[in-house]
Image: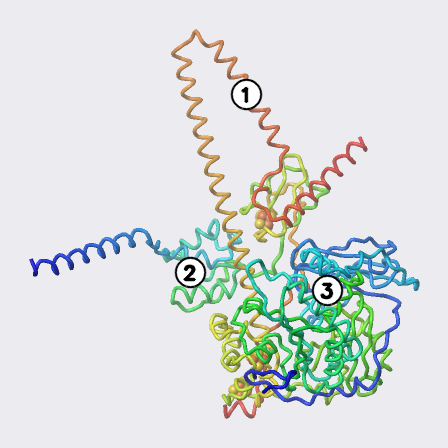
Amino acid sequence: MLTLTPILAITGLALVFGLLLGYSNIRFHVEGDPIADQIDALLPQTQCGQCGFPGCRPYAEAIATGEAEINRCVPGGETVIIALADLLGRDPLPLDADVGEPKPKAVAVIDENECIGCTLCLQACPVDAIIGAAKQMHTVVRDLCTGCELCVPPCPVECIHMEPIKEDIRTWRWPYPEVEFEPAREATA
Amino acid sequence: MTPPNQQRLWRFHGGLHLPDNKAQSLGRELTQATVPQRLILPLQQHIGEEDKPLVAVGERVLKGQMIARSKAYISAPIHAPTSGTVASIGPEPIPHPSGLVATCIVIEPDGEDAWAELPEPMDDYQQRDRADLRERVRWAGIVGLGGAAFPTSVKLNPGPNVRIKTLIINGAECEPYITCDDMLMRTRAPRIVSGIKILKHLLEVEECLIGIEDNKPVAIAAMRQAVTDAGLQKTRVVTIPTLYPSGGEKQLIHILTGKEVPSHAIPAQIGVVCHNVGTTAAIADAVLEGKPLLSRIVTLTGDGVAEPRNLEALIGTPVSDLIAQAGGYTNAVYKLILGGPMMGIALHTDAVPLTKAANCLLVASREEAPDPSPVRPCIRCGECARVCPVSLLPQQMYWYARAKDFDKVQAYNLFDCIECGCCSHVCPAHLPLVQFYRFAKNEIWAQEEEKRKAEQARQRHEARQARLERLERERKAKLRKKKEALEKKKGAGGKEQDAKKAAIEAAMKRVAEKKAAAAAPKNTEGLTPAQQRQVDNAEARRRAAETEGEQEK
Ligand code: SF4
Ligand code: SF4
Ligand code: SF4
């Protein structure tokens, strides 16, 4: 009897902890972040398709499977390439020459006097940034527009143009300080 | 035994003893500046959301009339500083490091100085609801006049579960050259003390400490007298040693209470609220007289101006006007700085107006504001860390900011840096350290904003994909049903008539539904108020265009 008590106690404890661990494994299970999700999180979500894929997510998946290089995102530019290189442990590459030149950020603007309300741009916009109904004037919600330009070609009356975002006191940033070390000292530094 | 007016003081890490250069502007009496030809009022003079104009070009405005406001919680309205006509609303140069223009309301004064109807004075504020008092301060457009420009009403509302123990009044004015707070304390101590009384009631605090650096004996005496005259209990004027930057909010709190405001926290979280003396006087004006913030005291000083002095000027007065009233420029003028030599920003033009938070115009000579010396690489001397009042490691932060490694620079608590400039001041390699910190802070904010936008775009894109897929499924399901119905029809010929009728009815119903759907704009779910407003405006324009078109017909 005396020897049985500790054995029972230990077994009981083992059982309790085993159940506890098992339960927490189910209850607090963390979904492993698939690599494509992590890549997608770094892409700017412009959905412009300039990378040659129909949106950011497909490009992220292509990078994940090794189908595409990390240097095809035009709006993301250098920042995104460096971030992707960091994530994947690769060397950063210069932006692929095939995908086009980076442009200043812009938003689409619909000329409300010209718009005939055909809804073609509405169907083209990947982020539902255009609001309107058939035969009624359409409007771009500035804040939602990613500047992908996908709505420009479908417009039959060419009333959509891209307006570069102007620098104002809200978007202005302190520049990177230009420091040039004294030449004589740098040699010894 | 400690004497009654002396209390224990603490010392913050580092700091600098700087030549204070305050005598120049204190030699002349405080004077009222004249009303200029044009008052330029930027819509953004505070931290937070930009105001929207409430007046139109050509409209007559009265002194004290609210001319711009925002509905956002963190914002402060703007009032007409005198009576006159709105001459324009549009871009004007403003005091900003970028040198860019921003939207301003320009008023041409009519010389009558006719007041608008003001809200009633609240002499009986002790009996008033605290929310009403806060609302009054909010209405008055008061912001932190020490230079921070944070809307004061927000600071008066620490939240339901926060108990404020100590009110601190900041009269330290630690930055060299600046004397506007000194002047205010010398000339209007009773007003400040009235403000303290209101603040004590509003924040339900017992204890109040007024911190003033020991290089302002006249101001200290005036404030002591005013506190005694008012019979204020548990309110002490505390003389603190002159040491830059003792006027920093967290530094002053530490000097007076020994408490540390934790990283990323605000003072209210440790039971302290701190207000500048000028702000406190403005609160008294708003509550006791119903007057909004229309003017402020500003120091004009430096070798570049003939008669350094303090002026009480209307908000919106062009800097050029103020300099003219301080005797104009001397030949020594080299640089125009808004604020002091340590934290001020260089102005690109004197056409910019005086704003609410502008405490000093330093018209500096070449000696006072020398060009940056040639820089050398960091020699790791550690001087910067020795003087940093926040106990940061400026050298490390510089290193990572320069390498644009923003995660690392944040790990070194970049956002606790108060940009006091002590580190740059002592750096023997003359590295523009603070510029690197400003750059890094801006870049991190911009990246966060971009991330937020990307996330929004991703969600909207996913929602759209899901919707398109659903529509496709529904279309297919309908097709299938039609096929089935057709097959059934083949089987049972007798019911053909009825089925036809039903089909026609269904088609008509579909058309009606489509019509109804067409009238309602799409993509209108999950919009922010600002976006909704833009949509509503577009809708209004569209309606207007429609009715116009009909009239033409
Ligand atoms: S409005 Fe045009 S440019 Fe903007 S996100 Fe939509 S499709 Fe792209
Ligand atoms: S003071 Fe200048 S040189 Fe010395 S460690 Fe700091 S950054 Fe380097
Ligand atoms: S500017 Fe920032 S890092 Fe430099 S001394 Fe001041 S608080 Fe410290």
Marks 1, 3: nearer the viewer:
3
Q: Measured from the top left, where is residue B264 in percent x and y?
A: 53, 69
Q: CA distance from mark 2 to mark 3?
A: 55 Å
Q: Is residue B210 above or below residue B483?
A: below
Q: CA distance from mark 1 to mark 3?
A: 64 Å
Q: Is residue B421 left or right of residue B146?
A: left
Q: Is residue B542 left or right of residue A72?
A: right
Q: Amino acid at mark 1?
A: Ala
Query: Does mark 2 fall on the same chain as mark 1?
Result: no
Question: Judging from the image, what secondary structure is the residue with disc 3 in?
Answer: loop
How does the figure colour the protein chain or chains?
rainbow
- Tell me, for residue A69, which label it has, or none: 2
The quadrant where ligand 3 appears is bottom right
Q: Which class describes the residues within 10 Å of circle 3: few (<14), some (14-19), or many (20+)?
A: many
Question: Judging from the image, what secondary structure is the residue with disc 1 in?
Answer: helix
Residue highlighted by disc 3: B142
Q: Measured from the top left, where is residue B1 in percent x and y?
A: 58, 87
Give the image quarter of residue B85.
bottom right
Q: Chain of mark 2?
A: A
Q: Amino acid at mark 2?
A: Glu
Q: Which class describes the residues within 10 Å of circle 1: few (<14), some (14-19), or many (20+)?
A: few
Q: Is residue B537 left or right of residue B317?
A: left
Residue highlighted by disc 1: B507
